[in-house]
Image (spheres, rainbow, N blue to C red):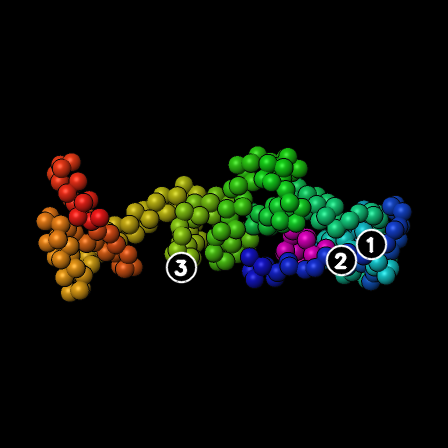
Amino acid sequence: MGAMLGGMDIPVKKENAQVVSGNTNIHISSIEANPYQPRTKFDEEALNELAQSIKTYGLIQPVTVRPVGSGKYQLISGERRFRAAQIAGLTEIPAFVRTVDDAQSIQMALVENIQRADLNAIEIAMSYQMLIDECHFTQEELGAKVGKTNTTISNYLRLLKLSTPVQVAVRDNQISMGHARALVAVEDETLQAKLVQQIVKDNLSVRQTETLVKKTLEGSQNRKTKVKITLSDAVRTAQSAIAKRLGTKVNIKKDISGKGHIQIPFESDEELKKILDLLQ
């Protein structure tokens, strides 16, 4: 997950200055981005448009920051405005300063940004997982925080089990969350990637994708069933020896992975008891 989206395993600063909360102007070079910002892609054209607006009217809505010591501040919310202000060439921006600890900062940043409509499903899923990991929420507690059911939270978290190509396709809006949820049933990552290519190429709907996944899994299972495994001479010898010892037919079956089982049929309780006595 981190490899796909640039990584978010960034140490959180522990040093907090005791600054009274409130509105103030802060030098833009004193502000650092929040490593727990859920949005991983910013529309460059939209940022430039916002930057032009800021040049004309100034930054109307303050960003929210927290002090992290040595005269530095960390963004809690407002990274899009912060980036646009940098593009616009501002040296100072209005900010609302909140004195909060690491856990509160993470929670505020994630919970506030999760509510944004422009986050994609993977960004939301990653935010949910970070809230669980960093703030030690259960899924039920997280659902109460963000106003979602436990089922909804689970559906998002399952997306993080998908292979990188599938997550990237969701992130880049090539496929929807519904498409991705259908692909969760496919364990083979190579097969997941092939199915994504087919979904995009043929512009399949979610329902068509569900049907495609079902047929693919059924076909894969049938192919496994039809593969005939030839037992080695050593295994056949062992099978004959066991059958002779027990006085009944014995079947040894193996699959292509080398795993298998031994079948010993019996026709009555008496015969079963005889077999068990011999095995003991």
> In percent of the image, x 54 and y 46: which residue is there?
157
Is residue 244 shown in magenta?
A: no
Residue of label 3: 190
Q: Nearer the viewer, residue 16 or 227?
A: 16
The label on residue 13 is 2
Type of secondary structure dominating the magenta stretch: loop
- For the residues marked 3 and 2, what is the alpha-carbon distance in whole angstroms? 39 Å
**What is the crowding at mark 2: few (fewer than 14 residues within 10 Å), some, or many (at least 20)?**
few
State the SS at label 3: helix
**What is the crowding at mark 1: few (fewer than 14 residues within 10 Å), some, or many (at least 20)?**
some
Residue of label 1: 16
Give the number of marks: 3
State the SS at label 2: loop
Residue 278 in the image, given as x and y percentages of width and height: 17, 48
Contact? badges 2 and 1 (CB < 8 Å)? yes
Residue 64 in the image, given as x and y percentages of width and height: 79, 48
Residue 254 in the image, given as x and y percentages of width and height: 23, 56
State the SS at label 1: loop
* Callout 3 amino acid: Thr
Q: In this view, does 182 lie above or below 12?
A: above
Residue 113 in the image, given as x and y percentages of width and height: 68, 46
